[in-house]
Image (cartoon, rainbow, N blue to C red):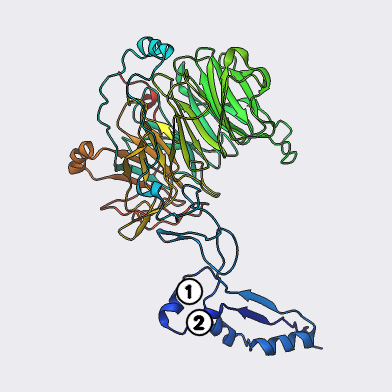
Amino acid sequence: MAPQTRRLAFPKVVIERDSDTEQSSSDDEGQEEEEGEGPLSESESEEEGKENGFEEKSEENFDAKKKGKAPITISLKKVCKVCKKAGHEAGFKGATYIDCPMKPCFLCKMPGHTTMSCPHRVAIEHGVTPAPHRNTRNALEYVFERQLRPRMPLIKPAYVIPDEVNCAVIRYHSRRVTCLEFHPTTNNILLSGDKKGQVGVWDFCKVSEKMVYGNIHSCIVNNMRFNPTNDGAVYAASSDGTISCTDLETGIALSLMNLNPDGWQGPNKWRMLYGMDINQEKGVVLVADNFGFLYLVDIRTNSKSGEAVLIHKKGSKVVGLHCNPIQPELLLSCGNDHFARIWDMRRLEAGSSLYNLPHKRVVNSAYFSPLSGSKILTTSQDNRLRIWDSIFGNLESPSREIVHSHDFNRHLTPFRAEWDPKDPSESLAVVGRYISENYNGAALHPIDFIDVSTGQLVAEVMDPNITTISPVNKLHPRDDVLASGSSRSIFIWRPKAKSEVSEQKDERKIIVCGRAEKKQKFGDQSDDSDDDTCKMKGKNIKSKKSRSKLTPNNLKRKR
């Protein structure tokens, strides 16, 4: 006897549409509906309905009631991406941002205008009070200027902006890049960490010489710092709760501290390490976790020193730590409790901060100025860059606030504005931009160079073939080089004047990495990570099949 199969009765499908789309029958409106937010277009849904035997809504309801099954409703109504309400659309459409009528301006967070017409978008220095030039310092600031900043030039030098891609490694990491660090003595070595816990070492002068260590951490590498006494070792703080010290020549990593020795015990007990810095004078590595605590690790013994200190609100994430370059006992921290705090390392106790710098939202980063340590630059999620001109002055309110687009949703490394370590005037900062701009029909996310003393946009660098966001940017401490991490790729920027001579002999050096390391053109890649794809095209560019390892001699100091 042949086996009997049970016939399954599937419920009918009801398709709901907006009234305006039902009345419209033109080809242009049909094309707009195909580009909308709905899962299917009107014409596609009708064709699929005919192919699958879908009937009209009244007949479907009748059949569903007859069989006792509720119909499945597919809604094609326009839904706002911002407020999640129907009846209107908002968000990015190509390179244009459409504002939500229920929300204020996406850039400055103020009502009364749209994002496209925001005055801060037209002129970034709008509403910014420039730094004073004379007759405003008190006696203490005057002494500080004479003693701690004797080499500061009186005339501000011209900025040198690296504005052209010189070389790149595409799909270098398996997940998005989270941090970058230049070698302290070898100018052409760049270290990078990613979301998967890998650490990459790349010689960007010899583009093919690169290496990725994948056995150091099991989760996001949030920060990296070189050992001040041994430039062949690097410390890394990861979201797996460990601090590692890795020998760059051998790739062997030593775990200095593990906050999760018993493994996963639930999200309420799992500790992740974010902010990290090294105090060379005291010989300790400072690292902070996602519960608001600060830990000290002795460099000489490579072990934890002392007890953890609560430096931010309990349960809040401490994402940034920075020691003052002139006064190492001063520590600057920032976190998710909407504060940046200044501490005295000689008296680290809970609630004993010297100053608390309030912000309206989460503080992504906070840095002292690189040469004098007298200024403070913070990046907050309220689309504001805040600058304090003097740590000896009034710290109750910032000297100026600069509106800049770096507020994001998810699946991105937080934007961090960083000082240019070579700028003697301590006024140039670099930060990636979130809102895309329309450049000849292409939606690009430039990297901004901002004069924090006036709020003016000095330069915005971009490449027409880089369509992804570049939240991770690092300026070289000695050369006119900018390294940017965009998705899984790393790009090296140089000034056009210096790169034109080398381009005559050799074109841009670009390496495309993939699973099979196949030869392919620069734009024929597919990124399976959580970021967007990166598309670039070059002339006569081919990927290298073999990965060359860095030799120990490349990591030694050049004489």
> Looking at the picture, how far across and down is residue 32, in whole percent?
45, 74
Residue 101 left/right relative to 28? right
Q: Is residue 495 left or right of residue 29?
A: left
Q: Is residue 544 visible?
A: no
Res 264 visible: yes
Q: CA distance from mark 2 to mark 1?
A: 9 Å
For the view shown, which residue lies furthest in the right direction?
A: 1
Give the class, few, some or many, for how many residues have Cα within 10 Å of label 1's Cα (few <14, many ≥20): some
User: Compared to 57, does 314 lie above or below?
Assistant: above
- Looking at the image, which residue is at 67% across and 34% down? 271
Residue 558, x across and y down, in percent: 32, 21
Q: Residue at x 63, y 36 (%)?
A: 240
Q: Nearer the viewer, residue 338 or 60?
A: 338
Amino acid carrying mark 1 in the image: Glu
First of labels 2, 1 by sequence position: 1
Residues at circles 2 and 1 in contact by the CB criterion of under 8 Å: yes
| Residue shown at the point (28%, 19%) measured from the top left | 153
Crowding at mark 2 (Cα within 10 Å: few <14, some 14-19, many 20+): few
Residue, disc 1: 34
Residue 31 drawn above or below residue 266: below
Name the foreground residue: 471 vs 100.
100
| Residue 323 image offset from top left, x and y in percent | 50, 21
- Mark 2 falls on what kind of element? helix
Would you place residue 328 above or below residue 446 in this image?
above
On the rendered image, what quadrant is the C terminus found in? top left
Question: Where does label 2 land, which residue?
Answer: 43
Residue 219 drawn at (x, y percent):
59, 39
Q: Quadrant of the N terminus?
A: bottom right
